[in-house]
Image: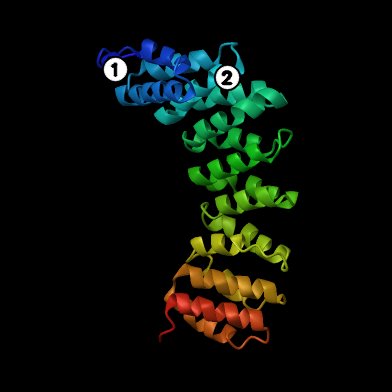
Amino acid sequence: MPDISKMKANGDVKGLIALLHWHDSDGYSATMRVRNRAIQALVELGDPSTVSLLIEYIGLDVPEGRYMDPLKALGAIGDPSAVGPIADLQDRFIESHYAYSLLHEDIIKALGNLGPTAVPPLIKALQHRKCGNGPVCNAARALGDIGDPSAVDALAKMLMTGVSAITEAVVEALGKLGPTAIAPLMREMSRNPQFKNWNAARALSSLAPDSFDPLVAALKHRSPGVRARAAVALGLTGMRSARKPLRAAMKDKNEDVRNEAKKALDWLGNKN
């Protein structure tokens, strides 16, 4: 068993990187313990040569599986200079169903840790559906975690796929991207009024107070489904100012809307 503490104390960057391909005779769990400890040691060591050596490695022509742990290490270190090389690796494999199915999760997770400069390659991953919905959903979540509003338009277009898993991931991401995401989320909340999916309402509630006025306006939408969702979203905002429009919604002609408005008021504490 390698002495990772000693290697870290000696600044043995190349030795620690070599451990990213360690195979332990005790099996998978032991193997991954060593690799994960090596990644953590590289992060803590903070040697400036680490990123360049890892970037050099992912540029090599090696079996697909050998890129996984170097990608994890680059993501854990979080140096934005790795975005370009990781994007190049994605470009090399994105058209290969087998290779990309193996690597997409590690590529996207690494990019998701590298900040706004990683938005363009993540949008490319978002738009690539040849390998199924998994990479698309992972890219959407990564864009949401980065929180850059420049991704709103690309994410909004994915709402039109009609795939529930993609819609759920995209709506969740949009709920983290600020006021520019309100319009597409309002459209999504209104697009299929009978669909029993409240995710857009929840996402809109997270964008309060900017979403407050559009949600109040939605209480007058022609569809009772939209009105009910708007009531739920207003309740989830936790805003005291939502009580007045919700009390008005208690007089709605539709029973479902009245019920949701009552629940929302209960969440807020129905006090003056």
The residue at the point 56 percent across, 29 percent down is 107
Instruction: Tally the numbered discs.
Output: 2
Residue 145 placement (x, y as % from top left): 49, 45
Q: Name the residue under label 1.
A: 8
- Compared to 106, does 261 lie above or below? below
In this image, 115 relative to 185: left or right? left
Residue 194 placement (x, y as % from top left): 73, 68
Q: What is the CA distance from the residue labelled 1 to the residue labelled 2?
A: 25 Å
The residue at the point 62 percent across, 59 percent down is 185
Q: Dot 1: what SS?
A: helix
Q: Dot 2: what SS?
A: helix
- Compared to 134, does 75 lie above or below? above
Q: Mark 2 points at which residue?
A: 65
Residue 190 placement (x, y as % from top left): 69, 66
Displayed quadrant of residue 65? top right
Residue type of the residue flagged with mark 2: Gly
